[in-house]
Every structure is written in C-alpha cells, then in structure tokens.
C-alpha cells in the first residue's frame, strides 16, 4: 500500500450496513449473505458481534442443523471496529494484527463494513 495514500475508510466501506438478529437461524444468515453478495452481517442488538461466512461454514462442518442453530450460537463476539476517518493502511494493519477479514465501521452507531475484499480492491 502506498504510504502516501490518504484514502479513508469512509471512501471504501460497504454501505448500507447489513444486519441480522441473534435469534435468526444460520440458514437465514447464509441466505442473506448470498442474496446480498456479502460475507458478514452485524448482529443487531448483539453488542459488537458479527456473523461471517466462516462462522456458518464452521457450524455446518461441526454438524449444526442450519434451521435450528441460531446466529447468537455461532457469531463472533467482541469484534474490533474502525471509524470512518481511519486511513486504509491502518485498516490493513489491523486486519493483519487481529487476523480478521471484516471490521464494522462505527461513528456513534454502526454505519458500514470494511472487508479484506474492500482493501484488496482499493490496492489494485
């Protein structure tokens, strides 16, 4: 990434933010991600939680019933977040440091999502 690049998260993040309730099934979460061509959803009222494609795949691989297993049972908790004014190079460093592919964007409230795909598109 160009060290002189001053691109901010707000210029690259995905909006509108897609959410799902913790009481939804992982089948519903998977369908919503497929239909919207995204790989993570913020869990509404989840207190800083998301569910990702990886969470769903891990649950299915472990034998979970996709209609009975709830989002809250497999979601990723205590997710790191970023602000819209953060520089893209800082986002890339955070993703590497925390080993994550998604960071919700917060400005008083959740406003978007930045993913490793967004970072890769920005670099290319």
Image: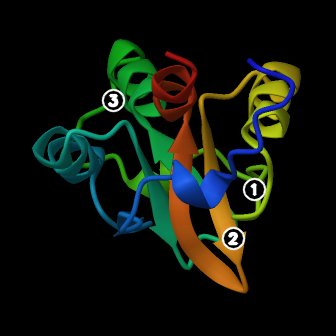
Mark 3 vs mark 1: give the one in front: 1
Q: Is residue 119 above or below residue 102?
A: above
Secondary element at tag 1: loop
Residue 81: mark: 1
Residue placed furthest toward the bottom? 108
The 10 Å Cα crowd at callout 1, few under 14, some 14 to 19, many 20 or more, is some
Horizontal side, residue 8 vs residue 101: left or right: right
Query: Which image quarter: residue 22?
Result: bottom left
Q: Is residue 114 above or below residue 46?
A: above
Q: Residue 89: percent from the left, percent from the top?
A: 80, 32
Q: Are marks 3 and 2 in contact (CB under 8 Å)?
A: no
Horizontal side, residue 32 vs residue 122: left or right: left
Residue beneath disc 2: 106
Viewer-closest of 69 and 123: 123
The residue lying at 54 percent from left, 73 percent from top is 111
Viewer-closest of 60 and 122: 122
Asked if residue 74 can be seen in this view, the reply is no
Q: Are marks 3 and 1 in contact (CB under 8 Å)?
A: no
Q: Residue 40: percent from the left, percent from the top?
A: 43, 44
Q: Are marks 2 and 1 in contact (CB under 8 Å)?
A: yes
Viewer-closest of 34 and 67: 34
Mark sitting earlier along the chain (3/2): 3
Secondary element at tag 2: strand
């Amino acid at each position: 990434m160009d060290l002189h690049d001053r691109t901010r998260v707000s210029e690259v993040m995905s909006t509108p933010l897609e959410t799902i309730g913790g009481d939804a099934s992982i089948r519903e979460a998977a369908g919503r991600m497929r239909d919207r061509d995204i790989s993570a959803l913020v869990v509404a009222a989840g207190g800083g939680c998301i569910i990702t494609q990886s969470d769903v795949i891990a649950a299915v691989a472990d034998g979970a019933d996709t209609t009975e297993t709830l989002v809250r049972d497999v979601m990723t908790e205590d997710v790191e977040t970023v602000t819209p004014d953060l520089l893209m190079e800082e986002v890339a460093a955070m993703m590497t440091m925390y080993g994550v592919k998604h960071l919700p964007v917060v400005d008083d409230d959740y406003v978007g999502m930045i993913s490793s795909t967004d970072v890769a598109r920005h670099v290319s």
